[in-house]
Amino acid sequence: MKLAGVELRRIRMPLVTPFRTSFGTEVDREVLLVRVFGDEVEGWGECVAAAGPLYSAEYVNGDEQVIRDFLLPRLPADVTARGLGAVFEPVRGHPMAKAAVEMAVLDAELRLSGMSYAAYLGATRTRVPAGVSVGIMDSIPELLDAVAAYLQQGYARIKLKIEPGWDLEPVRAVRERFGDILLQVDANAAYRRADLRHLAALDPFGLLLIEQPLPEDDLLGHARLARALTTPICLDESIVSARAAADAITLGACSIVNVKAGRVGGYLEARRIHDLCAAHGVPVWCGGMLETGLGRAANLAFAALPGCTLPGDVSASDRYYTRDLTEPFRLADGLMSVPSGPGLGVAPLPDILHEFTERTDVVRLP
Ligand code: NPG
């Protein structure tokens, strides 16, 4: 596929409520959109890097520079999504930057061929159950109100963000109030090896999993924790590639894997991780990074793969934004529909895109 250029567009989307995690509070999302275009072809990508390097080393301004100065100059005259892995390999790190370009190229390619992301990735379902991620709150009553509202809306699974000082009590309170719901927790690497006994105190609550309790590079610590706890360990930040997933599974560092395309360099690597986990009988679920409707469309396609056997962090548009960038994704009977049109199957709504845009740069390709 021949591309004429790439548009790098910065938008800012206010969140419906601030989202607090162990690494900070997001009030709005600063998003970098990548639009590739050529003769009668266009494709959209969304960079999931946040404003600051707090979830991982990446941040959106850095990724914008990496895309402009190091990734786009490497694009060959004939671009294919499948070829990008090798093309981008010399550039170290920056998986979210690489994933954003790949997402746009794949969207353009699939639009041309009339195939959906879901069909391309190998999805086997047209609707998927939706989970919701609930941030750290100021008080337990506030948390219980938030969880009650999400359950009422039909979310199939609740994930609580935890950190030292906000873990056992919120989990106990949610279990006591809502009984036998699908419940899991996410620590975003907020604990250390010395916290093993404290984390074991979560075992009696029958959680589906505990996600990324220890730092990203501590696979051995996670393996020890996995042996000591009955709660299954799920890894997120540690799983940066299919090889990292294979290592973690071999070491016994996790028995469940969260996949986020941005974290692993794109949907093609995400698919490889899915396949590897499926071959090992390790359940996978689709993580979320507060994406707009663009990223959500691609995540829904991924979440519909057969190995994604647990509900993902793919919530309805109104959980994040009053007005989404695309036609809003809605929850119906606890399920989200997987887009079936060509490519992502969705595109930004022009007036909303215009309203949220802060600046746009166009890079012409040779
Ligand atoms: O539903 O998109 C969503 C949010 C899910 O909790 C969620 N994401 O650590 O997984 C995470 C967290 C996150 C959000 C991470 C934003 C990084 C940025």
Image (spheres, rainbow, N blue to C red):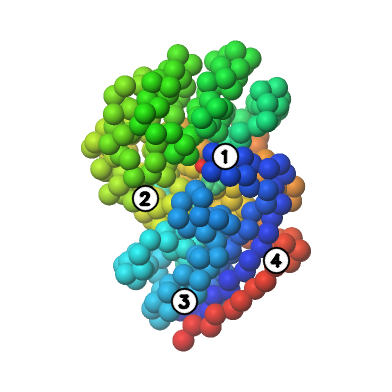
Q: Is mark 2 on a helix, strand or loop?
A: loop
Q: What element carries label 4?
A: strand
Q: Is mark 1 on a helix, strand or loop?
A: strand
Residue displayed at 35% across by 21% down: 229
Comparing 265 with 228, the one in front is 228
Indicate which label's residue lies in the foreground, 1 or 4: 1
Residue placed under numbered mark 2 in the picture: 240
| Alpha-carbon span between mark 1 and mark 4 | 26 Å
Residue placed under numbered mark 3 in the picture: 69
The x and y percentages for residue 103 are: 48, 61
Up-down relation of residue 44 to residue 335 (above or below) = below
Q: Quadrant of ligand 1?
A: top right
| Alpha-carbon span between mark 4 and mark 3 | 22 Å
Three-letter amino acid code of the residue under disc 1: Thr
Q: In the current view of this chain or complex, which residue is farthest to the bottom?
A: 366
The x and y percentages for residue 336 are: 59, 39
Say left or right for 251 vs 132: left
Three-letter amino acid code of the residue under disc 2: Val
Marked residue nearer the N-terminal end (2 or 4) = 2
Is residue 116 something that shows in the picture? no
Residue placed under numbered mark 4 in the picture: 357
Residue 29 lies in what quarter of the image?
A: bottom right
Three-letter amino acid code of the residue under disc 3: Asp
| Alpha-carbon span between mark 3 and mark 2 | 23 Å
| Alpha-carbon span between mark 2 and mark 4 | 30 Å
Three-letter amino acid code of the residue under disc 4: Thr
Residue displayed at 54% across by 75% down: 6
Residue displayed at 37% across by 50% down: 240
Q: In the current view of this chain or complex, which residue is farthest to the front?
A: 194
Indicate which label's residue lies in the foreground, 1 or 3: 1
Residue placed under numbered mark 1 in the picture: 21
| Alpha-carbon span between mark 2 and mark 1 | 20 Å
